[in-house]
Image: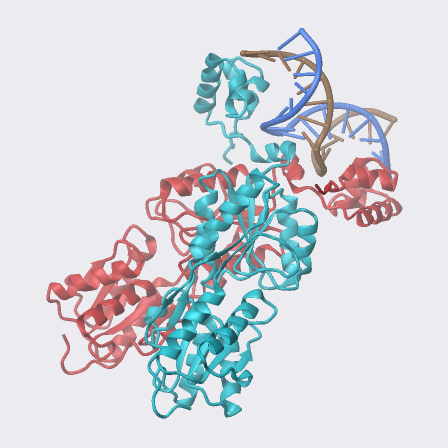
Chain colours: A cyan, B red, C brown, D blue
Amino acid sequence: MKKLRAAPTLRDVAALAGVHATTASRALNPQTRPLVNADTVRKVIRAAESLGYQPNPIARSLKTARSFTVGLVIPDLTNPLFPPIVRGAESVLLPAGYNAWIVNTDNDADRERAQVESLRSRQVEGLIVATALLDHPLLTELHAHGVRVVLVNRRVGGIEAPSITGDDAAGVASAVGHLADLGHRRIAHLAGPQSTSTGVARARAFRHAVTDRGLEYDPTLVVECEHWAEADGARALRSLLEAGRRFTAVVAGNDLIALGCYDVFAERGLSCPDDVSVVGFNDMPFLDKMRPPLTTVSVPHYEVGAEAARMLLETIEDPDRVARSVLMPTSLVVRGSTAPVTGSGR
Amino acid sequence: MKKLRAAPTLRDVAALAGVHATTASRALNPQTRPLVNADTVRKVIRAAESLGYQPNPIARSLKTARSFTVGLVIPDLTNPLFPPIVRGAESVLLPAGYNAWIVNTDNDADRERAQVESLRSRQVEGLIVATALLDHPLLTELHAHGVRVVLVNRRVGGIEAPSITGDDAAGVASAVGHLADLGHRRIAHLAGPQSTSTGVARARAFRHAVTDRGLEYDPTLVVECEHWAEADGARALRSLLEAGRRFTAVVAGNDLIALGCYDVFAERGLSCPDDVSVVGFNDMPFLDKMRPPLTTVSVPHYEVGAEAARMLLETIEDPDRVARSVLMPTSLVVRGSTAPVTGSGR
DNA sequence: TTGTAGGCGTTATCAT
DNA sequence: ATGATAACGCCTACAA
């Protein structure tokens, strides 16, 4: 068995430098360094380097109740939407000396509660949360307890937490506008879950965009999906078809719902975009290689994550900062799933 | 400003139960519970519950040098290959009372070193590492220092660390066999980086599979990609085409390299599978919706992650356990990117 | 400018 | 069966 040399502690450094541990602590900490003699500082730093000293963050946390760590609460890492948010957040946090603790909730409230509890007990200094529901008791609680939270992507009703989201209204408007320009008059909306702010915002934006374009808003052309997933998108589209609704285009709540439509097209021998045009939302990776390449609304997820991290760091440094809500600009990416309306319609 | 009620500590529980903190500790800890009077245990537990007591893992770590946390070292979370590994690992770790710290290295050695350092300083009890290179000084070092490491997906040369990988040889053999059955005789291989065990293993397996099938192995039909990415796959395929090589099928090192080929097909007006068949590796999500749907070798990544976590927990509980290397079974998923060879060839 | 003392919350060790 | 004491490694008063 190999004997593991224990990591050097502050006392080891102090001993080597011939000073007291306190002095070593002060010398090593940029905050308190001015308090100590320049020569001593140099000696201590040299000692620390020669021993390969790394402060023990656990001991530090215990004493200071800080951790230089923030929690990222993600509903599902396998949804390609979220990894770019994570990377964006890390791109800001790591250079600032913070670490990110990523947890998956699997869209499960109990698991979310347990994970958040675990983060809190490890003294995370704030949370970036991507799991928000409009009615979200846990987040309401955390907010009431003064836990620093920044929401990404979705918001919670009734609390004033800072949030960074895509501009759903503008995005949906650009999608509807694009379809209208192509001559589509009967456009369906496969809405995301109405338990999420994004689902509601996009559905509302759809209604407004349609009427703004002088089209008739037909509520029977709007179906809610239970989850933001392919299977639910497929189910929603099937229900429209089976009810005999007529439409020539679909605005999907997100890309996965749009891809679910592709499955139904294959089942029923429909052609996209010849029979039906489809627009997604998010611009997740690889859409350009789909059959057909999916027209979608691009959201700058990396920037969403980065901005959320910046905002969280701001609130950590200045707790009295007022909550802001930032809308990140979206852009329409036109690909092959949308085309001018044909004579036939459906 | 809201006053945050500090979390109750063990002393609070002890005081409420009318016992000493030590006793409360023993009563709450299943390991030591038998040492204390059943009545006392009940009193303490009741007190703990009424206060909502949660042990402070930081203090516990400081004292015990344990953390019930393991680190997951991932090269790039936006590569859809890795999230399922993460979830598989979590599916084992969380129920066992462990947490997972996920870190992204961006394929950068310095960043990896920093992240691993940070994990170690937080007392993680082991590492699940997906970033292995054949020549990997950091991992060699960690191994020499006795750090518990389980490798996933890829291995390191020269050290005997347990590893969980897909069965590259069998997977490539099934891909080559499929193409041979379709009549292909001149098959190219766009190999992954030869700095990774996977890249090497698949290239070697390709050579063997080709000759096993009685085909001629032509080294000019094998090109190494610098990274496991679309752009590199595209570059490699272009180099073959520009050199005027003749082949009717491609075995790509992984799915991303295969998708890079799609870009080149589009550039040059080639049709897949009519002009060239392509097989990928990994079966990442959404391949069934690509144009054309990609034939690939499926690797059970979720299970890879789960198995790695199980193995790591085993080594934590029984450090003398000998390192095993597990090959997870792969399966060929035939889709639309492969077809019988046509007369023309190229 | 530096040192001393004490404590963050928990558990290991020794004593009762 | 329970209590007292000390220690994990660090930092923050306070004292010198």
Rendering coords of residue B51 (x, y %)? 80, 46
In this picture, residue B262 sits left or right of residue A74: left
Toward which corner of the image does residue B296 lie, by quadrant?
A: bottom left
| Above or below: residue A191 compared with residue A169 | below
Closest to the observer, B213 or A77: A77
| Above or below: residue A155 compared with residue A206 | above
Tell me the residue at 64%/49% (across/down). Answer: A118
| Above or below: residue B180 compared with residue A198 | below
Look at the image and tell me whether residue B78 can be seen.
Answer: yes
Rendering coords of residue A337 (x, y %)? 36, 77
Rendering coords of residue B69 (x, y %)? 58, 47
Q: Quadrant of the C terminus of chain A?
A: bottom left
Toward which corner of the image does residue A109 lie, by quadrant?
A: bottom right
In this picture, residue B250 sits left or right of residue A144: left
Q: How many marks?
A: 0
Toward which corner of the image does residue A285 lie, by quadrant?
A: bottom left
Tell me the residue at 84%/46% (across/down). Answer: B47
Tell me the residue at 41%/85% (across/down). Answer: A248
Closest to the observer, B142 or A132: A132
Look at the image and tell me whether residue B306 can be seen.
Answer: no
Tell me the residue at 41%/43% (across/down). Answer: B112
Rendering coords of residue B89 (x, y %)? 53, 57
Closest to the observer, A228 or A341: A341
Closest to the observer, A273 or B315: A273
